[in-house]
Image: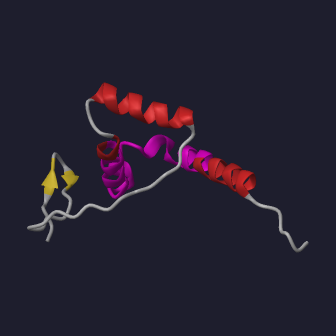
Amino acid sequence: MSGGTVLGWPALPTSPEPRYRAVHAYLSDDAHAIWQEVSTEAGVSVSGLIEAMGIDLTRPGDERILTPDLAELVTRARAVDAARRRRTRRPNPTG
């Protein structure tokens, strides 16, 4: 069931027993430190930031907080993903 809106944001689904799912990510030491520093300075958890960002991404484009630089952020994320794939690729033992 839906919980309506909270401060103009879509509320998360509610149920008698809240359910949470893990998001697992490997980050560079620097990226990890940045997430921890930002969340500490803001007085929220990293998971709270991630969840709020995800909710923001479900809003119409003109209502998003992340909109102005989202395309550039996606481009940078693709570059990070590609670099990681190149670093972790193992040689093929058969050829």
- Residue at 83% in and 68% down: 92
- Closer to the camera, 94 or 45? 94
Question: Would you say residue 69 sits in the magenta stretch?
Answer: yes
Residue 92 vertical position relative to residue 67 in the rendered view, above or below: below
Prevailing secondary structure class for the magenta stretch in the rendered image: helix
Q: Position of residue 59 (x, y in %)?
A: 32, 56
- Closer to the camera, 30 or 13? 30
Query: Going by the picture, which residue comes out furthest to the right?
Result: 95
> Which quarter of the image is occupied by the N terminus?
bottom left
Query: Going by the picture, which residue comes out furthest to the bottom?
Result: 94
- Residue at 32% in and 48% down: 63
- Residue at 33% in and 46% down: 47
- Its colouring scheme is secondary structure
Question: Would you say residue 72 sits in the magenta stretch?
Answer: yes
Query: Going by the picture, which residue comes out furthest to the left?
Result: 16
- Closer to the camera, 36 or 10? 36
Q: From the viewer's perspective, tell me whether residue 23 is left or right of residue 90.
A: left
> Which quarter of the image is occupied by the C terminus?
bottom right
Q: Position of residue 10 (x, y in %)?
A: 21, 57
Residue 10 vertical position relative to residue 95 in the rendered view, above or below: above
Q: Which residues are magenta?
A: 49-76
Q: For residue 15, what is the image quadrant?
A: bottom left
Residue 16 vertical position relative to residue 79 in the rendered view, above or below: below
- Residue at 32% in and 62% down: 21
Query: Going by the picture, which residue comes out furthest to the top?
Result: 41
Q: Position of residue 73 (x, y in %)?
A: 54, 45
